[in-house]
Structure formats: C-alpha cells, structure tokens
Image: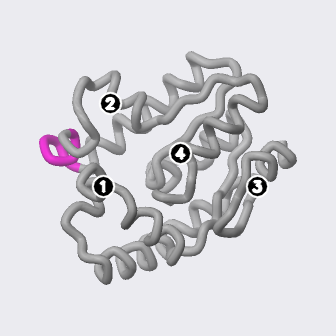
Amino acid sequence: MMGSGKTTLGEQLATQLGYAFVDLDAYIVQREGRSIADIFEQQGQERFRELERQALEAVVREYEHAVISAGGGAPCFFDNMDFINQYGESIFLDVPASELAKRLLASNLQVRPLLAGKTEDELREFLDNMLEHRRSFYEQARHKVKGAAITSEQLSSLL
C-alpha cells in the first residue's frame, strides 16, 4: 500500500543484498518523461496500469538481481501478482491503515493522484476501503510482514 515504506525499505534491502533498486513509479516517470499525476490526468488510470505492467516486464528483463518497489496498485491489475511471484520473491508490507494515514498526511498528497484533494477524514476512509479491496491481491505475496515499524533486516531474513 502507499505509505507502507516500499521505497525506503526497498532501498535499504537492495543495499543489504547488493542488488539494484528500482522504484517502478520512478521508472515509469523516466520512461514516459512526465509525472504519474500527468499520466492519470491525460490518459487515465487504465493507461497508467498498462504502462505499469510494461515497466514491470521491462525491469524483470533488464535486471538480473533487483529489489523492485511496485506501486500499491500494481499487484491488483492484470495478472501482475502471478507475474511477480513467477519472477521473484514478493513481500506484503502489512502496515495498519491508521499508520498509513499518518505517514501520508505528513507527505505531499498532491503528487498522489488517488489522494490529491482529500481531507484527513476522507483519506482515512479511502485507505480503509482501498486496503480492504486490495488485501486479497496483497495476501498472494510469498512473504508477509505486519506492523508499523517494519525493518529491512526483517525483510532480508525472509529471503
């Protein structure tokens, strides 16, 4: 989920393993030459999800060993979760929605198309609903780590 620490923990884990780190959203931004918000605004979420799948496939081909931080929605579209599990290890960072809201409220919500313009109450409700909807996809991950203070050491011990 957004705000779970995928990028921060992913960078730390990649360093520990001696692997490359790839943030899938940053990869898409670089390939497309525009922000995720612009892609959503100009072409919609459906096109973004297509670009996301293409990027996922490209990263798997491009890197022999990498820690990939996939966007929170990536596992929920096409057969992305099956693809991820086929080509690597997957970890579900199961952070409570209340902690996600706290972290996201401390960031710039405007850069996140699904959150832009939401009030604190709207954000909390949105995250609860989204987590409920996405959980069945996330639960397909090979590894699950639950809590508000997950560390890269916990993650590396799983692999």
The kind of residue on which mark 1 rests is Asn
Q: Residue at the left extreme?
A: 42
The kind of residue on which mark 4 rests is Asn
Residue 138 position by quadrant: bottom right
Cα separation between marks 3 and 1: 30 Å
Q: Residue at x 52, y 51 (%)?
A: 75
Q: Is residue 135 above or below residue 92?
A: below
Camera-nearest label, 2 or 4: 2
Residue at which label 1 appears: 108
Q: Is residue 83 above or below residue 22?
A: below
The disc label shown at residue 143, or none: 3
Q: Residue at x 30, y 55 (%)?
A: 108
**Mark sitting earlier along the chain (2/3):** 2
The disc label shown at residue 29, or none: 2
Asked if disc 3 and disc 1 are in contact, CB closer than 8 Å, the reply is no
Where is residue 34? Give x, y as percent.
22, 30
**Mark sitting earlier along the chain (2/1):** 2
**Mark sitting earlier along the chain (3/1):** 1
Q: Residue at x 42, y 73 (%)?
A: 127
First to last magenta residue range = 39-44
33 sits left or right of 146 in the view: left
**Mark sitting earlier along the chain (2/4):** 2
**Mark sitting earlier along the chain (4/3):** 4
Cα separation between marks 2 and 3: 28 Å
Residue at which label 4 appears: 80
Quadrant (top left/top right/bottom left/bottom right) for the C terminus? top right
